[in-house]
Amino acid sequence: MMPLAMAKSGETVVIRKITGKDSIRQHLAELGLVVDESVTVVSELGGNIILQVKDSRIALDRSMATRIMV
């Protein structure tokens, strides 16, 4: 496993574990970032990571992306 922040642009990965407080995990779940969900890294802009989750694009900052293990 590695943090989502280390995934390359264009790579599709599956979320294996989400760490952090319950409130943070709940917030990520509301965005569609849950265990066993596939996400595609679209690009990295200014320290933010753009993800394709189902039919949505989401921007996460690097500190949040390090809490998601893929």
Image (cartoon, rainbow, N blue to C red):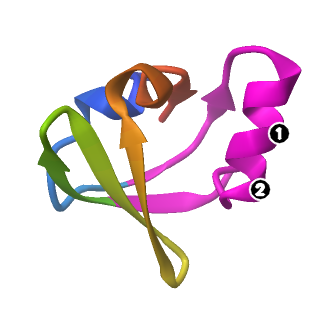
Element at label 2: helix
Q: Is residue 20 left or right of residue 45?
A: right
Decide: few, some or many residues near mark 1? Use Cα within 10 Å; few <14, some 14-19, many ≥20: some
Q: Which region shows up in magenta?
A: 13-40
Amino acid type at mark 2: Glu
Task: Kindly indicate the quadrant of the structure image that contains residue 7.
Answer: top left
The CA span between labels 1 and 2 is 6 Å
Q: Is residue 29 magenta?
A: yes
Q: Is residue 24 above or below residue 35?
A: above
State the residue in front, 61 or 53.
61
| Residue at horizontal 23 percent and vertical 56 percent from the top | 11
Say which residue label 2 marks. 30
- Mark 1 vs 2: CB contact within 8 A: yes
On the image, which quarter does residue 60 sit in?
top left
Q: Is residue 42 located in the magenta-colored stretch of the structure?
A: no
> On the image, numbered disc 1 is attached to which residue?
26
Q: Quadrant of the N terminus?
A: top left
User: Secondary structure beneath disc 1?
Assistant: helix
Report the residue at 50% width, 77% height from top.
56
